[in-house]
Image (cartoon, grey):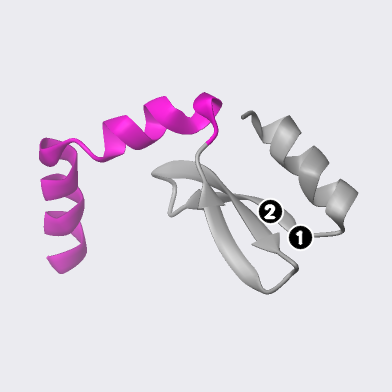
Amino acid sequence: MSLAQIQEIGAREGWWTLHRGRHGFFELVELWIENQFLLELLPPEFAAQYRDFMQPQNLKQVIAATTA
């Protein structure tokens, strides 16, 4: 489902719904069920960013940069 649909569910239920970036690499949505249990969701509009980030060559670059 889309970001808008997730936010609509959160608003309807009174649950926190946060659009987050993960250190500039990709975006996701935090949906806090009953404002206590976290679900991290990846709407289709963020999937390409996540797939690109998770490619082995990109992960190697990130790890190398953070350990240097």
Q: Quadrant of residue 48?
A: top left
- Nearest the eye: 32 or 24: 32
Magenta-colored span? 43-68
Q: Position of residue 64 (x, y in %)?
A: 11, 56
Residue occupied by mark 1: 16
Q: Mark 2: few, some, or many residues within 10 Å (few <14, many ≥20)?
A: some
Residue drawn at x 79%, y 43% is: 9
- Nearest the eye: 55 or 39: 39
- The count of marks equals 2
Numbered mark located on residue 31 in the image = none
Residue occupied by mark 2: 18
Residue drawn at x 75%, y 67% is: 34
Give the alpha-carbon distance from disc 1 to disc 2, as whole Å.
Answer: 6 Å
- Placement of the C terminus among the 4 image quadrants: bottom left
Residue 59 falls within the magenta-colored stretch:
yes
Amino acid marked by disc 1: Trp
Q: Secondary structure at mark 2?
A: strand
Amino acid marked by disc 2: Leu
